[in-house]
Image (cartoon, rainbow, N blue to C red):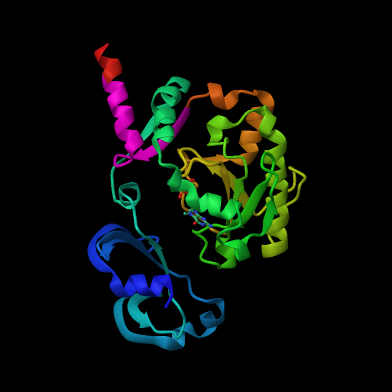
């Protein structure tokens, strides 16, 4: 029995953490053998081969409105195909639970001082095990057969593989490139010294997206490309990585203002100002359940008292 099968069998539902009715993505919290387990269930798009005959598989049809040339209703399309991607985090930590919990979000403007006094101490407090999954990939202990590229040089190398968020459909391609160097935590660690590394990541990802998915891209930066490369600030995991998503995914998770920084812009900024990311204020959106939010609020309250 696979781990997933065992977990589903033993999963005891506790509550819904969040339910996005637009993306059809739901996060559930439950217990498995007494430990917290998060399940995410995401409805998959129709499989290309089923599309031409979808209209012939509609059951329980219920007409709703007929108006001139317009009309709509509801139905149940039953296909003998998988229709849901199921992921788990087990055992889930309190931090995972807070991350997926529905919550109010705020924009925070992180000056270099806020980074030094609030964000960096938070990063230093994160238990090392939190990025064990990254180390496993870098050391060839996990997802080995999924790796698309691996330059193992400890300082200048990086790995490229499908992101956990990718459902495998070509038009929702989602890859992640992870640097080998553990000293690079986030955007804030980058200086002009890292431009060659970032450019190699860019050209390697362009080649992979083209070879693997037939997406247009070219090392020539003027050439139009069919995917975006970006970094998150704040990321969830402080070991530098770059997201690569197909543009056919109209609304990819985490590509919004207040979170995503285009790799092209990052390279440009570093070419113009070698220490841009040590000097700039970076604004980001954060949930009120995130530990950084409470640290930031405490810091602001202290400042206001002075
Ligand atoms: P992030 O910006 O730190 O956080 O990106 P986010 O999850 O808020 O976007 C980390 C990226 O790594 C995300 O796109 C995750 O989906 C992806 N990711 C996380 N985990 C635990 C794994 C994993 O175990 N394997 C793979 N392939 N990708 C992962």
Residue 184 on image: x %, y % = 57, 36
> Which residue occupies the foreground of this view, 288 or 45?
288
Is residue 67 shown to the viewer in this render? no
Nearer the observer, 6 or 211: 6
Q: Residue at x 35, y 70 (%)?
A: 7
Q: Residue at x 28, y 69 (%)?
A: 11
Residue 3 inside the magenta-drawn segment = no
* Residue 2 visible here: yes
- Residue 31 position, x and y percent, is 26, 63
170 with respect to 299 (left or right) = right
Q: Single out the residue that lies furthest toward the right.
A: 220
Residue 53 image offset from top left, x and y in percent: 50, 86
The furthest residue to the top? 306
Q: How many marks?
A: 0
- Write down the region rendered in magenta: 282-301
Which residue is at 69% across, 28% downward? Answer: 271
Answer with left or right where residue 66 lies relative to residue 263.
left
Q: Quadrant of residue 105?
A: top left
Q: Is residue 14 left or right of residue 57?
A: left
Q: Nearer the viewer, residue 187 or 59?
A: 187
Residue 227 shown left or right of residue 255 in the figure:
right
**Position of the N terminus by quadrant:** bottom left
Task: Give percent across and percent down for residue 75.
Answer: 34, 80
Hey, which quadrant is residue 142 in on the image?
Answer: bottom right
Position above or below: 168 against 133: below
Image: 86 above or below 113: below
Residue at left offset 24%, top offset 14%? 305
Q: Is residue 284 magenta?
A: yes
- Which quadrant of the rendered structure holds the C terminus? top left
């Amino acid at each position: 029995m696979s781990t997933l099968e065992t977990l589903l069998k033993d999963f005891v539902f506790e509550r819904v953490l969040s339910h996005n009715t637009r993306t059809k993505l739901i996060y559930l919290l439950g217990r498995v053998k007494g430990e917290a387990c998060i399940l995410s269930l995401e409805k998959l798009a129709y499989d290309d081969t089923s599309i031409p005959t979808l209209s012939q598989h509609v059951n329980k049809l219920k007409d709703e409105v007929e108006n001139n040339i317009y009309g709509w209703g509801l139905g149940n399309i039953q296909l003998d195909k998988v229709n849901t991607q199921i992921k788990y985090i087990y055992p889930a930590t309190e931090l995972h639970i807070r991350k997926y919990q529905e919550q109010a979000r705020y924009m925070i403007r992180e000056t270099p001082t806020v980074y030094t006094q609030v964000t960096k101490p938070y990063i230093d407090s994160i238990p090392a095990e939190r990025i064990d999954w990254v180390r496993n990939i870098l050391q060839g202990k996990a997802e080995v057969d999924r790796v698309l590229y691996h330059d193992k040089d400890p300082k200048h190398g990086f790995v490229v593989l499908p992101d956990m968020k990718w459902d495998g459909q070509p038009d929702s391609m989602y890859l992640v490139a992870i640097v080998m160097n553990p000293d690079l935590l986030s955007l804030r660690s980058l200086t002009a010294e890292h431009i060659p590394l970032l450019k190699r990541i860019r050209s390697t990802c362009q080649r992979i997206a083209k070879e693997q998915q037939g997406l247009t891209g070219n090392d020539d930066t003027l050439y139009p490309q069919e995917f975006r490369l970006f970094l998150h600030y704040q990321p969830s995991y402080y070991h530098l990585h770059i997201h690569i998503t197909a543009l056919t995914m109209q609304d990819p998770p985490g590509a919004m203002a207040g979170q995503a920084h285009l790799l092209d812009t990052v390279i440009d900024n570093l070419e113009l100002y070698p220490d841009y990311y040590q000097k700039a204020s970076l604004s980001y959106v954060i949930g009120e359940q995130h530990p950084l939010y409470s640290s930031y609020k405490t810091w602001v309250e202290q400042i206001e008292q002075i």
